[in-house]
Amino acid sequence: MASRSSCAVLGLQAFILLLYTVGRNMAEQEVENLSGLSSNPAKNIFAIRENGTTCLMAEFAAKIIVPYEVPSINEVDWDLEEAIIQLPRDTEIKGKCWNNESELHLSWLDKAYTLKLSFLKEDSTKSHGKNWKLNKIQFSYNVSERTNFKNGARPGKHTASKQHLSLMVTPIGMSYECDSPERVSLTSTDHQKIVTLLLSDVHIQPFDINSDFVYSEDYRCQTDQRKQLEESLPVILGITLGVAIVIILAVYHIHHKMTANQVQLPRDRSLYKHMG
């Protein structure tokens, strides 16, 4: 009897796992490449939709710097060069939206390159609230592709990634926006080389989009906030100084007027007999 009960429990667990897996696979949604709407040729716009509404929106300019080896002049050693890879307009999109996780998969040049961004909701005890963040980045590339990797000495496929990230930390229900460039270092399977992902003009919301194709309230990155403060500080100081000068002049004018209206008493006491 105990053996049958164990088998039944195992069978039920397997069935639940199957339903969960099927549900996650069915959650792959419609995708939209809206990059043609961007006035910046380096900036791409992507959207993932579920049940007729947007569940993830992302727009950014991306540049990936990949070190690779080429034959040296002596034909014995290798020299190191860098491939600068731009995210093209005709990027192929895939993506998934779940309650607490979402993913954006981008590939181009017949999947010679694939960029995967993973987002996660989390409870944050430090900020006393719920946030979402970019927690994993994975970039796969093929050094055999000669558009970017010219004369590569060691052709082959490699993956550069970084996990357990806390990037773009944003309160739940808000979108993340950052004009300033952001640099992320990824470790490659190609002899632990460091691949650099550069993101700029970023606007992303992977959860809780209330209106179709419309971002929620923006949450500005700290770099932009500091930049705005630095730009506005001279203006604030100028206004403060101007107000201070006006106050000083007003006080001086009032004091001068009150002093001029006062009766001047004679210093020579012998003159007091003429008063009154």
Image (cartoon, rainbow, N blue to C red):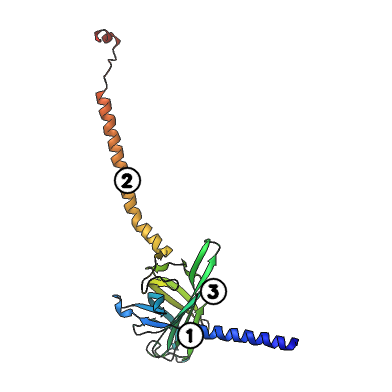
Amino acid type of the residue that numbered disc 1 sits on in the rendered structure? Met
Q: Callout 1 environment at 10 Å: few (<14), some (14 to 19), or many (20+)?
A: few
1 or 156, which lies in front? 1
Residue that badge 3 annotates: 164
Residue 160 relative to residue 11: left or right: left
Residue at mark 1: 26
Disc 2 is placed on an element classified as helix
Q: Residues within 10 Å of mark 2 (few under 14, many from 20)?
A: few
Q: CA distance from mark 3 to mark 1?
A: 26 Å
Rounded to the nearest angstrom, the CA distance separating label 1 from label 2 is 63 Å
* Quadrant (top left/top right/bottom left/bottom right) for the C terminus: top left
Q: Find disc 2 in the rendering and name its residue.
A: 241
Figure check: 82 above or below 184: below
Q: Quadrant of residue 256?
A: top left
Q: Earlier in the sequence, mark 1 or mark 2?
A: 1
Is 33 in front, or is 111? Answer: 33
SS assignment at label 1? helix
Residue 52 visible somewhere in the drawing: yes
